[in-house]
Amino acid sequence: MMLFSAKLLIIYFALLCLHLKASGQPDPEVHWSLPDGTTVNSVLHGEDRKGRARRLTVFDNGTLLLPAVGMGEEGEYTCYAENQGGQDSMKVKVKVMRTSSPSFTDSKSYRVIKVPLGATAKIAC
């Protein structure tokens, strides 16, 4: 068995898409173990421990999609691929970052600031 692991930092409320490509003869069945211990696959989608339907999709190829990541999705995700020949797994640690990189709301606006020669200019960013 070969274990691969990765770490992923994702911005709060962003899309999380975990792709994988499992192969074998016969084709392996793929399922995911989520940070709260729930197991999901493309046939049966999981429910969280409070009984609410999860906001996730597992595609037939094994890709896991969460459309808007919150702090509750932080943790370790494990993907399992299994057939008669055995089992393999891949672990991904997801860390949710509450902040995003800075951006300007109006990058096309500008203004002219007149400063006397030798004086200090104050420019608001």
Image (cartoon, rainbow, N blue to C red):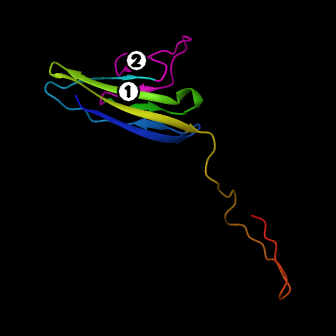
Q: Which residue is mark 2?
A: 39
> What's the magenta bit mostly, secondary-structure-wise?
loop
Q: Is residue 39 magenta?
A: yes
Which residue corresponds to the image point at 24% horizontal and 32% vertical from the top-left? 2
Please determine whether, in this image, residue 78 is positioned above or below residue 18: above
How many neighbours does mark 2 have within 10 angstroms: few (below 14), some (14-19), or many (20 or more)?
some
Which residue corresponds to the image point at 45% horizontal and 34% vertical from the top-left? 93
Along the line of sight, the residue nearer the viewer: 116 or 93: 93
Residue 3 image label: none
Q: Nearer the viewer, mark 1 or mark 2?
A: 1
How many neighbours does mark 1 have within 10 angstroms: few (below 14), some (14-19), or many (20 or more)?
some
Q: Is residue 113 left or right of residue 9?
A: right
Question: In what element is the residue under mark 1?
Answer: strand
- Residue lying furthest bottom: 117
Which residue corresponds to the image point at 78% horizontal and 70% vertical from the top-left? 123
Q: Which residue is mark 1?
A: 78
Q: Is residue 100 left or right of residue 115?
A: left
The image position of residue 112, as x and y in percent, is 79, 77
Please determine whether, in this image, residue 103 is positioned above or below residue 28: below
Q: In terms of sequence position, does the residue under pointer 1 or pointer 2 come before the other?
A: 2
Question: In what element is the residue under mark 2?
Answer: strand
The boundaries of the magenta stretch are 35-61
Q: Amino acid at mark 1?
A: Thr
Q: Is residue 45 magenta?
A: yes
Along the line of sight, the residue nearer the viewer: 103 or 2: 2
Displayed quadrant of residue 92 = top left
The image position of residue 18, as x and y in percent, is 40, 35
The image position of residue 20, as x and y in percent, is 31, 35
Q: Amino acid at mark 2?
A: Thr
Q: Quadrant of the N terminus?
A: top left
Please determine whether, in this image, residue 52 is positioned above or below residue 106: above
Which residue corresponds to the image point at 35% horizontal and 28% vertical from the top-left? 59
